[in-house]
Image (cartoon, rainbow, N blue to C red):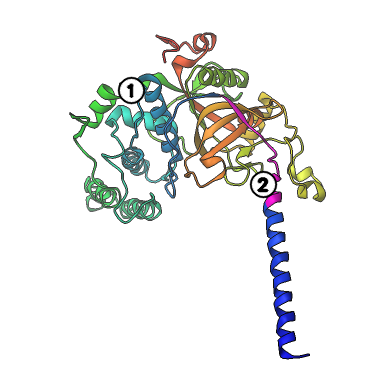
Amino acid sequence: MTGKGFRLIVILLITALTQSLTYAQKTEEQNKKEEKPAYIFATKYEAKRTPVKNQYKTSACWCFSTISFLESEFIRQKSEEIDLSEMFIVRHAFLQKANNYIRLHGKTNFGRGWLNHNVIDIIRRYGIVPENVYTGNPVYQNKPNHEEMAAVLKAMLDAILKRSGSSFKERSLAVTPKWKKAFEAVLDAYLGRLPETFHYKGRQYTPKSFASDYLKLNPDDYIELTSYTHHPFYQKFRLEIPDNYGCDCGDNYYNVPIDELERSVDSAIKNGFSIVFAGDTSERDYSGTKTGYGIVPLKEWEDKTKQEKDEKIVEPVKEKEITQQMRQENFDNFTTTDDHSMHIVGIAYDQNGTKFYLAKDSFGTDRKNKGYVYLSRSYFRLKTVAVMINKRSLPSDIANKLDLIVQNKMTK
């Protein structure tokens, strides 16, 4: 064979291989386009809200979800979108948690997590500001990251307590008030100094006057509901979860049967309100990145065969009907834990008519459903630890059972 003939054969082989690979790639892409999702959702009720944000490495879902909820409350009442500062709340929260940690000699939690009512409490005490007034992000960061700051702050507190932990009551070892100034200096270095006054739309405000005069936010409008049988229904109690700590947290959750909690949430959403979800998102059948939904299949993962585990979900699966007893068992054995908070903004239905709750998450839009997650009715009933809700949205009979005084009911 001549060199020319050999080169021709090589060229033909390369051409054939290239065409084959191109065809295979196009076929694969076509199959992906034609592959139907297992769940097809249609949203029926939807509250107005602000765009999805990214909490990144802050562990501040408790703050992002509650602030998103309050932004929706402002839109609902004023028909005006507003962007509020999460880091203003987080900055105050760290100091409050530090005070509590020192007062209790370190025998409590000091972490980045907290709860939704803590946001309301901080606004009641200190007010709130717009995002552009206090971003809380150093110039070298485009996403909030509190990992180093939290480690430094915890080390400071532990060092103070260790130095003062001598069995001899020496005055030289007493805790001085100077630790607070040092603690706040670290917060200032990482998050920036808090504003005392600022201008917004041509008027000067303090954080407190902005909350009361511009936002017209009434902290007493917002309550939290839960549903567990180890406490009496229609009374308030202190929910026993790790993040519910503080010297003044008190009895801050109203306890209602799960059917009434579900009805309260549905009533709110159907009347233009939204709610805050606090609950468990660490389940195998929950994913905000891959599937974009959370479900409770009839069959437990451990009870499935290898073949069943390997099967791909191609259509909605049958789910458990969640009872009050199942909720309680999951809470008592730690199968349900309080590990995340999201802003529920709507009700949707899948192609089989199963109800799902549309939740706005806070990890950016580069995820499934552009940052939103669908929670099935079963998932919501089983894995919701508590919700925050505007008491004006409650059905009248439930408000009466809780002995709540609600004026201007269902005011939008």
Quadrant in the rendering for residue 285: top right
Question: Does 85 appear above or below 275?
Answer: below
Q: Measure how far apart labels 1 and 2 are at the Cα level.
A: 47 Å
- Residues 395 and 135: in front is 135
Q: Which residue is mark 2?
A: 33
Q: Which residues are magenta?
A: 30-44
Question: How many other residues sit within 10 Å of disc 2, few (<14), some (14-19) or many (≥20)?
Answer: few
Question: How many other residues sit within 10 Å of disc 1, few (<14), some (14-19) or many (≥20)?
Answer: many
The answer to whether residue 161 is magenta is: no
Amino acid type for the residue under numbered disc 1? Leu
The local secondary structure at tag 2 comes to helix
Question: Does 94 appear above or below 73?
Answer: below
Whether pointer 1 and pointer 2 mark residues with C-beta atoms closer than 8 Å, the reply is no
Amino acid type for the residue under numbered disc 2? Lys
The N terminus - image quarter: bottom right
> Is residue 245 in sight in this rendering?
no
Q: Earlier in the sequence, mark 1 or mark 2?
A: 2
Badge number at residue 217? 1
Pinpoint residue 43: horizontal percent, then vertical percent.
Answer: 58, 27
The answer to whether residue 33 is magenta is: yes
Pinpoint residue 38: horizontal percent, then vertical percent.
Answer: 70, 39
Pinpoint residue 389: horizontal percent, then vertical percent.
Answer: 47, 23
Q: Disc count in the image?
A: 2
* In front: label 1 or label 2: 2
Pinpoint residue 241: horizontal percent, then vertical percent.
Answer: 52, 35
